[in-house]
Amino acid sequence: MKKYVIKGPVRLAGDVQISGAKNSTLKLMVASLMIPDEVTLERVPRIRDVFLMAQVLEQLGAGVSFEGDRLVIDASGELSEETPYELVTKMRASIQVLGPLLARLGRARVAMPGGDAIGSRPIDLHLSGLERMGAKFQAEHGYVEGMCDRLRGVNVLLEFPSVGATENLLMSAVTAEGTTTIENAAREPEIQDLAQFLNAAGARIDGAGSPSIAVEGVERLTSVEHKIIPDRIEAGTFAVMAVATRGDVLLKEARADHLELPLQKLEEVGAEVQRGDDGVRVTMHRRPSALDLVTLPYPGFPTDLQPMMMVLLSQSDGSSILTENVFEARFIFVDELNRMGTRIRVEGHHAVIRGVEKLSGAPVRVPDIRAGAALVLSGLCAQGRTEIHDPGHIGRGYEDFDEKLRGLGADIEVAVTDA
């Protein structure tokens, strides 16, 4: 067992290279199952979830090979329809193989997904949309089993702009018979990246990035090479860290157009933000101002950046209210923050944050990826020594996280824990 040991406070300064988007990479890997040919992905982050997904693809019969930040996937051979329980339960994104396997094989058997414990994220929207396209499902013994002839194009109206459901339906529709429209679709940049990848492989997708996506089915997809977009959540994490530590950080290759509202909120608390072709520079010289914040689906404020903003606002001059509208259990790490001297009170899906002048180092435990990054940030801001236990969660979503922080001046080490 390992832990992070952080000595603070520290002011982060310098340049940090933003990796490829985790949430895009995983879906592009899954989409490769629909292509009976070789696929090359560039700017692939070498993180735990990517390696887990590579194992899922290999178990299904695809060839997977890494070459630095390039990933080559060959799904030209015979594929299996069953994803292994021991892998799927470690990572929720594995449920995304459901649509591509149905589209390619006409059958799929997928273990119910696992992942972070941040609230219920039911797959009902995935299943109901695929049922409208002609699939039939049954769930038993911890698995979802689906069968179909060739999927057919239909009109699907999502009850909620679910990212996962939009992606699953989008992939399934690419080789379906006829035209599929997805209304109230999620609009995230990662969905636009997925559509660009599929279109380069021969798909006919229009409207990705808007609430209405139209997909005209094609018979077959072909080989493609694709460079993954920069990770907006990693970029946003380092941007918030720069502000919270009153630092000066250039986020190399970060795309400001994917972070419009987070950057706007950082400016509202007092940060200076410079947007350029080579990335985004974030500078802070004073104690942050308080503000109220609400998480919403894109282009609203992302729930994945909410934990880091909570740490930032806990040091503000005044009181803030943070409202979580996406995942109801995002506040499960608040008790850990309060151990470090924050004054945060949770009331339902609201967190009332009263700013304090300083935090104190303490031992804390990581419950999920983004809470882990937030706890690291609190350690960077706190007086004295902070021990971050169970930091393995962080490696699921951030590439070389501690190394990048050391490059910005952080005093963070990886140590062996006695526990």
Image (cartoon, rainbow, N blue to C red):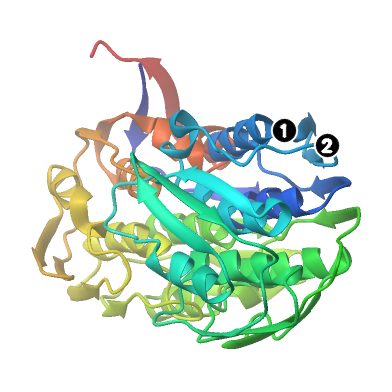
Q: Position of residue 372 (x, y in %)?
A: 35, 43
Please, is residue 273 above or below residue 148 in the view?
A: below
- Left or right, 220 with respect to 145, comes to right
Q: Is 161 rendered above or below residue 94? A: below
- Tell me if residue 255 can be seen: no
Q: Hey, which quadrant is residue 281 in on the image?
A: bottom right
Q: Which residue is mark 1?
A: 61
Whole-percent x and y of residue 294?
31, 78
Where residue 106 appears, as percent x and y from the top left, is 66, 55
- Indicate the position of residue 353 as horizontal and vertical percent values: 16, 67
What residue is at 11 percent from the left and 64 percent from the top?
A: 346
Most foreground residue, 415 or 121: 121
Kind of residue at badge 2: Gly
Q: Badge 2 is on which residue?
A: 77
Pointer 1: residues within 10 angstroms few (<14), some, or many (20+)? some
Q: Residue furthest front?
A: 149
Q: Tell me what residue is drawn at x 78 percent, y 75 percent.
A: 217
Q: Quadrant of the N terminus?
A: top left
Q: Which mark is residue 47?
A: none
Amino acid, disc 1: Gly
**Can you say which quadrant of the picture contains the C terminus?**
top left
- Local secondary structure at mark 2: loop
Question: Which residue is at a point 18% across and 43% down the rendered structure image?
Answer: 336
Check whether the beta carbons of the residues at disc 2 and disc 1 lie within 8 A of each other.
yes
- Relative side of 182 to 310, left or right: right
Q: Is residue 311 visible?
A: yes
In space, the residues marked 2 and 1 are separated at their CA atoms by 7 Å
Q: Earlier in the sequence, mark 2 or mark 1?
A: 1
The residue lying furthest to the top in this view is 418
Looking at the image, is 96 positioned above or below residue 155? above
Element type at mark 1: loop
